[in-house]
Image (cartoon, rainbow, N blue to C red):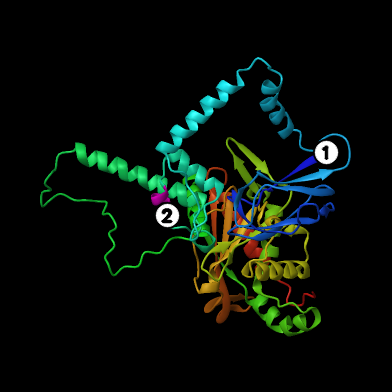
Amino acid sequence: MAKFELKLPKMGESVAEATLNSWLKDIGDHIDIDEAVVEISTDKVDSDVPSEVSGTLIEKKFEADQVVEVGQTIAIIETEGGAQDSPKSPPLKQEMHTPIESSPELPTKKVIADVQNTVVAAKDLITPISSNGVRFYSPLVKNIAKKEGVSQSELDQIDGSGKGGRVTKNDMLSYLENRTKSSASAEVKSTKKPVLASPSSSNPVTPTVSSGADEIVEMTRMGKLISKHMMNSVQTSAHVQSFIEVDVTKIWNWREKIKAKFIENTGEKITFTPIFMEAVAKALAIHPMLNISVDGDHIIKHKSINLGMATALADGNLIVPVIKNADQLNLMGMTKRVNDLAVRARNNQLNPDDIQDGTYTVTNVGGFGSIMGTPIINQPQVGILALGAIRKVPAVIETSEGDFIGIRQKMFLSHSYDHRVVNGALGGQFLKTIKELLESWDENRQV
């Protein structure tokens, strides 16, 4: 028999841990390859963890509602066969036990007595952190509290952003950071002499003070992750923007003409999004140096064109599901993929794989009436395109018989790109290519 360690897999960019919702298998149950063993959830997706081997579940490392970090072992599965599937753990156990078992002269009684004395002394100094009937603390939170000297009373006062108000790893890190800043501020105040400000002096930084009438709202965990991700992007990439106006009258008229028949024949609603996604995928194929990532001093040119589709959620947060190999989809396939991802994103039904490996992102600011925007690049990508609202505007129409004023459907495209590796010429050419693809739309196109 061999033992296989089932570990929590990577759940997507910036996701370091997950909550174990429920076990789908009990001790002693047989498990087939790819059969779901446990149900987990993150702030982005709910998912099942399948087994990589066939065997029998013999040990559960965590209970329901506990937080597990990516890469941690969550279960042990016994398999039939020779070599053990997870060779790292047994050697560690052998190294720990071998010295005791192979050293008959080791003064065991003295060691045990010393350990007991140490434990007794520790109990007199430290009260261990424990969960109570109101709040549950995961082993990870308890370990952080123990390491950083956070008392039970302090821990009980921390506002939890997890499920049911549970204190998470990020809550602990945020609390410790604020505590450190408060301590440093107190030390500075105690060492500085008071200085009277003159009427002409200015204070550029004014601390935020809340009155009794103000409401203090804790950021959600997903909001904190997005905030950190956006700040990291601004500090990493040299953002620059280019804008272009596009006449989409042909596309508007074509969609109005076919949308009723399209939904009747396919059961799918066709929006403008898959049309724009198709154009972006074609433009990236023409300009592959925008389908890249930066790794230090190296550029990674991606073979696949995987389009991220920024999707607003009901709670105000944003998630970016990814359309894999977008350049290989026809308009029908693109429409089905866009609709499927949008629906599952809003219903919190995305899989971890649905939000990974994007190489370029598109966001629709026009859905809220904005005519243009300056979106922040989704790291480690180097570009993001914002789609503005489509507006009916008066415009000059050039014909062989002269220029005329007419009513046209127009929109702005806003392109943010990383000026470290994408210069203005390439950023502008990319936008121009998308404009040409959209304005040359075939009004007689069949789907």
Q: Is residue 65 above or below residue 312?
A: above
**Which quadrant would the N terminus be assigned to in this image?**
top right
| Residue 440 visible in the current orientation | no
What secondary structure prevails in the magenta region? helix
Q: Measuring from the top left, give residue 56's x and y in whole percent.
A: 82, 49
Per the rendering, the mark at residue 156 is 2
Q: Quick one: label 1 or label 2, which is nearer the N terminus?
A: 1
- Disc 2 is placed on an element classified as helix
Residue at (40%, 37%) from the top-left corner?
A: 125
Q: Is residue 335 above or below residue 221?
A: below
- Disc 1 is placed on an element classified as strand
Per the rendering, the mark at residue 2 is 1
Residue 26 lies in quadrant: bottom right
Q: Residues within 10 Å of mark 2 (few under 14, many from 20)?
A: some
Residue at (69%, 59%) from the top-left corner?
A: 47
Q: Is residue 155 magenta?
A: yes
In magenta, the rendered stretch is 152-156
Q: Residues within 10 Å of mark 1 (few under 14, many from 20)?
A: some
